[in-house]
Image (cartoon, coloured by chain):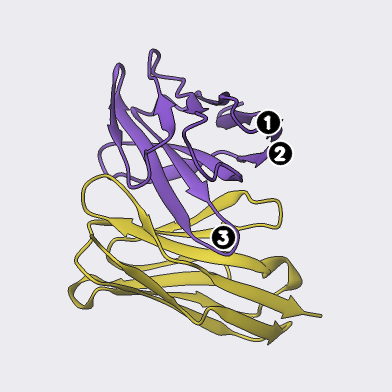
Amino acid sequence: GIQVEQSPPDLILQEGANSTLRCNFSDSVNNLQWFHQNPWGQLINLFYIPSGTKQNGRLSATTVATERYSLLYISSSQTTDSGVYFCAGGSQGNLIFGKGTKLSVKP
Amino acid sequence: DGGITQSPKYLFRKEGQNVTLSCEQNLNHDAMYWYRQDPGQGLRLIYYSQIVNDFQKGDIAEGYSVSREKKESFPLTVTSAQKNPTAFYLCASGVLTNNEQFFGPGTRLTVL
């Protein structure tokens, strides 16, 4: 089955810094999502982005489907950005999740 | 107020008991899903359903059962056959046109 690899596994930033999170897929996917898991466990939808680039405020994402990777950019990070970021993708209506990137933003 | 609700938020059970987790959605989504999350890990698919009265096994279906009698509801039963049931369980629903999924708040199950 499809394997999803996320990097880095852990990231510590000072408030105001920028960061890039990466997600690699072992095979082609036709649906791809980025999520933020808050400290209470809730998964918040960030982007549905099987291809192309999208922006939402300080967050943006780019997926290069032909090369099977996606990037999540966080600019001017805030302490409220802390948590775990997951990417997930699939080809048959399901989602395969990576292990996540744990982000800690220090004041 | 639209969304996906899961109950209870926390659940404790004794070893050997079956327990049912509730998931309801009022988003008119055709598809519903159950995932399991263990500490420090991503989510793994247990079961999913794309239409009423039909469902498919995911990657880790052993020890679990589901039903889909109504479009809005997709309860998950954790049976005594599940060897390591302590985990965080997340329900999701989505549209079939693009398979985008939206998640409920989750249920934390602890087996004592």
Q: Colour of chain A?
A: yellow
Q: What is the chain letter for disc 3? A: A
Q: Residues within 10 Å of mark 2 (few under 14, many from 20)?
A: few
Q: Callout 1, which amino acid? A: Arg
Rendered image: mark on residue B13 = 1
Q: Quadrant of the N terminus of chain B?
A: top right
Left or right of A91 in this view: A69 = right
Q: CA distance from mark 2 to mark 3?
A: 30 Å
Q: Earlier in the sequence, mark 2 or mark 1?
A: 1
Vertical side of B21 occupied by B38: above or below: below
Q: Indicate the quadrant where residue A25 lies.
A: bottom left
Q: Residue at x 19, y 65 (%)?
A: A28
Residue at mark 2: B112
Q: Which chain is purple?
A: B
Q: Residues within 10 Å of mark 3 (few under 14, many from 20)?
A: many
- How many marks do you count on the picture? 3
Q: Is label 2 in a helix, a strand or a loop?
A: loop
Q: What is the chain letter for disc 1? A: B
Q: Tell me, yes or no, whether dots 2 and 1 are on the same chain.
A: yes
Residue A14 position within the rendered picture, expressed as x and y whole percent measured from the top left: 73, 86
Left or right of B76 in this view: A67 = left
Q: Residue at x 27, y 65 (%)?
A: A51
Q: Nearer the viewer, mark 3 or mark 1?
A: 1
Vertical side of A105 occupied by B98: above or below: above
Residue at mark 3: A36
Residue with the most extreme front position: B16
Q: Are marks 2 and 1 in contact (CB under 8 Å)?
A: yes
Q: Is label 1 in a helix, a strand or a loop?
A: strand
Left or right of A81 in this view: A3 = left
Q: Tell me, yes or no, whether dots 3 and 1 are on the same chain.
A: no
Q: Residue at x 53, y 51 (%)?
A: B37
Q: Residue at x 50, y 26 (%)?
A: B77
